[in-house]
Image (cartoon, grey):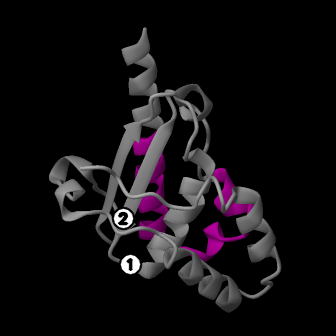
Amino acid sequence: MQLPQHPFGTAITLKDIEESLNKSPHWEDRYRELIRLSRKMPTLPEAWRTTDNEIFGCENRVWLAYTLTPQGNFHFVLESESRIVKGLLAILLSQCEGQPPQNIADVDLLAIFGQLGLAQHLSTTRNSGLRAVAEAINNAARAALHHDQ
């Protein structure tokens, strides 16, 4: 079964998200923007919602599924039961979708949340969950690099 496509990292870039969030000075506006982003996230098919793909340590259930394209780039799909979490996951996707493993193996994917002024508005458990997702993405990239050697 093929993973669904999404616009993050291609039609919707990190720069697009930054510009949109920066136009929203209040947390409530940014919150609405995150929910808007979540609506553009694909639904991960049930077949991919396995224990192996579930990220533990998150406040809400989150799944990470990925494949490598024939060109050696990642195609990630992230799923959550929470709209706000899906919006946050869209920000992660915008950084790593379509990238080769070497571009994301050691990147701090969470730094953007501080730069966007989002980190301080997130609960400790939500930050912890995002950290677990970012670590899983970095680990997938490292494993792909080791596999190529």
Q: Can the viewer see residue 45 in this picture?
A: yes
Name the residue beneath numbered marker 2. 79
- Crowd band around label 2 with a 10 angstrom C-alpha radius: few (<14), some (14–19), many (20+): many
- Crowd band around label 1 with a 10 angstrom C-alpha radius: few (<14), some (14–19), many (20+): some
The image quadrant of residue 5 is bottom left
Q: Secondary structure at mark 2?
A: strand
The residue depicted at 81 percent of the width and 74 percent of the height is 22
Image position of 87 with respect to 26: above or below: above
What is the magenta range?
Answer: 111-137
- Name the mark on residue 82: 1
The image quadrant of residue 35 is bottom right
Image position of 130 with respect to 125: above or below: above
Q: Secondary structure at mark 1?
A: loop
Viewer-closest of 67 and 101: 67
Q: Residue furthest top?
A: 149
Viewer-closest of 147 and 124: 147
Q: Is residue 108 magenta?
A: no
Disc nearest the viewer among 2 and 1: 2
Asked if the residue under mark 1 is in contact with the one under mark 2, i.e. CB atoms within 8 Å, the reply is no
The residue depicted at 80 percent of the width and 84 percent of the height is 25
Image coordinates of residue 24 in percent, x first then y, are 78, 83
The number of numbered discs placed on residues in the rendered structure image is: 2
**Three-letter code for the amino acid on which mark 1 is drawn:** Ser
Q: Can the viewer see residue 123 in this picture?
A: no
